[in-house]
Image (cartoon, rainbow, N blue to C red):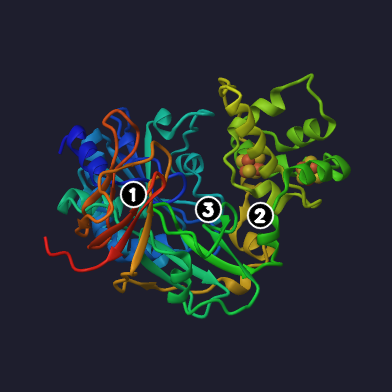
């Protein structure tokens, strides 16, 4: 299959990064790549879906990765995974000999956070540094995650569009579980499938405890949802996500002691990136403008959250303030400056944060449960499918109220010249509402 053919299949079938920002997968294909990497790091505490999906669908996932490698002309296929994912590793090892036309191998990642950051995955598995502000292709690599490649497999083989998302439902729920959910399903219904919350006063984190955000039961599943974690409202993780920026600035002014710990452990700083959260906090709390570098270099923050969730003993909010500041200067038209990476910190290995230690520090050890994969068919009565689910242009509805749709039918398209992908209905039914934000579908028999 040519790169052009693969690109159009991935686009038409709505394949995007299954997690994170959800970058459209076709847009990553590039003939400059000599290496394709499958990211099975899953470094957020409590999340289990990637290793489970990998263990079950290693054949399909590696077929798709190989298809990508052939289409872009890459010689190397690497599966980036942690050595503790034994079942998934056995499944991969059984498949790898089929790909002797490539240099196909496992690349072990350290059991640290954030091992799944693409920049870190590239460094750990190839020794290459992605230049600051650039994508992995600048280091000759394309990185896809496990579920993205499973979706690509079905798109290539059956032209099956992306309509569902694997999510781990865990925390204070009766039956922690990993489910395959239709996009557009309400979070309240998702929690019911895990037996509901076991505590009366709870909050829900959409995504991992480090990089996820607080959500509500009225929110819905998207192509980038990865987990729903139920925690007491008083829990450390929940409280850290309720940042009020003016208060956070005042707290920084009062108690930031410039100890430098946030910079010392910063995952991107350790790789030589110019982000320096300690200098940023110092400049911000002093209102200093003589040197703008600490502000401009916020562009090189990955948002991993180590600085505010783990490193700072004063409980300050460097990551959140950096995000607010970066958003503000971007809006004001400031562009990312050119930058080169400094040498990797010689003590990087020693400074990396162990996954188990992070889980304990976040007070999540008690919630680190099995959450087994359960692929029962789930068909809610009503789905609310949002038109903007990931990075890129929002999709444009191509159905109207009263229309009947089939499972897998395109319900929102994307202009030819825009970065984005169409959206397809997860089930057969009737369109009961269309707005500029979402399409609502009611499950039902489709007689067409
Ligand atoms: S770790 Fe906390 S106290 Fe220390 S420099 Fe960073 S923000 Fe300030
Ligand atoms: S969130 Fe904090 S630790 Fe992570 S890259 Fe940004 S500044 Fe560094």
Which of pointers 2 and 1 indicates the residue nearer the eye? Answer: 2
Check mark 3 vs ligand 2: CB closer than 8 Å? yes or no.
no
Instruction: Report the residue at 40% width, 41% height from top.
Output: 23
Crowd band around label 3 with a 10 angstrom C-alpha radius: few (<14), some (14–19), many (20+): many
Q: Of helix, strand and loop, which one carries label 2?
A: loop
Residue 364: x and y, percent?
63, 67
Q: Which residue is mark 2?
A: 241
Can residue 248 be seen by looking at this rendering?
yes
Check mark 1 vs ligand 2: CB closer than 8 Å? yes or no.
no
Instruction: Report the residue at 48% width, 51% height from top.
Output: 109
Residue 174: x and y, percent?
52, 80
Q: Eyeballing the image, is 448 above or below 352? A: below
Q: Quadrant of residue 12?
A: top left
Crowd band around label 2 with a 10 angstrom C-alpha radius: few (<14), some (14–19), many (20+): some
Tell me the quadrant of the picture where the N terminus can be found. Answer: top left
CA distance for labels 1 and 3: 16 Å
Residue 96: x and y, percent?
27, 54
- Residue 110 is marked as 3
Return the residue nearer the eye: 97 or 120.
120
* Mark 2 vs 3, N-terminal side: 3
State yes or no: discs 1 and 3 in contact (Cβ < 8 Å): no
Q: Which residue is mark 1?
A: 105
Count the numbered circles shown: 3
* Mark 1 vs 3, N-terminal side: 1
């Amino acid at each position: 299959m040519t790169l052009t053919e693969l690109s159009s299949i991935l686009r038409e079938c709505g394949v995007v990064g299954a997690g994170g920002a959800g970058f459209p997968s076709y847009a990553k294909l590039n003939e400059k790549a000599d290496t394709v990497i499958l990211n099975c790091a899953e470094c957020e505490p409590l999340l289990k879906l990637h290793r489970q999906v990998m263990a079950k669908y290693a054949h399909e996932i590696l077929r798709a990765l190989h298809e990508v490698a052939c289409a872009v002309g890459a010689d190397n296929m690497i599966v980036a995974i942690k050595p503790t994912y034994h079942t998934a590793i056995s499944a991969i090892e059984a498949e790898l000999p089929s790909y002797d036309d490539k240099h196909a191998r496992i690349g072990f990642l350290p059991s640290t956070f954030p091992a799944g950051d693409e920049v870190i995955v590239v460094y750990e598995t190839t020794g290459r540094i992605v230049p600051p502000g650039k994508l992995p292709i600048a280091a000759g690599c394309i990185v896809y995650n496990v579920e993205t490649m499973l979706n690509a497999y079905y798109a290539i083989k059956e032209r099956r569009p992306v309509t569902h998302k694997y999510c781990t439902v865990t925390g204070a729920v009766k039956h922690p579980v990993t489910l395959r959910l239709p996009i557009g399903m309400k979070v309240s219904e998702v929690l019911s499938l895990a037996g509901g919350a076991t505590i009366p006063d709870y909050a829900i984190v959409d995504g991992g405890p480090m990089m996820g955000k607080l959500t509500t039961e009225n929110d819905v599943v998207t192509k980038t949802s990865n987990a729903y974690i139920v925690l007491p409202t008083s829990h450390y993780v929940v409280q850290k996500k309720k940042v009020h920026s003016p208060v956070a600035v005042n707290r920084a002014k009062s108690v930031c002691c410039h100890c430098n710990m946030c910079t010392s452990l910063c995952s991107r700083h350790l790789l030589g990136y110019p982000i320096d959260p300690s200098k940023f906090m110092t400049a911000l709390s002093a209102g200093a403008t003589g040197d703008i570098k600490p502000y401009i270099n916020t562009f090189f923050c990955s948002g991993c959250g180590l600085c505010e969730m783990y490193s700072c003993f004063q409980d300050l909010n460097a990551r959140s303030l950096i995000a607010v500041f970066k958003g503000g200067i971007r809006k004001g038209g400031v562009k990312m400056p050119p930058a080169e990476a400094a040498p990797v910190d010689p003590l990087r290995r020693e400074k990396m944060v162990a996954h188990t230690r992070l889980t304990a520090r976040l007070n999540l050890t008690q919630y680190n449960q099995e959450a087994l994969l359960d692929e029962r068919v789930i068909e809610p009565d009503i789905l609310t499918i949002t038109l903007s689910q990931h990075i890129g242009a929002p999709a444009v509805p191509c159905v109207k109220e009263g229309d009947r749709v089939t499972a897998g039918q395109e319900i929102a398209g994307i202009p030819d010249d825009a970065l984005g992908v169409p959206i397809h209905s997860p089930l057969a039914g009737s369109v009961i509402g269309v707005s500029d934000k979402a399409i609502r579908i009611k499950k039902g028999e489709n007689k067409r």
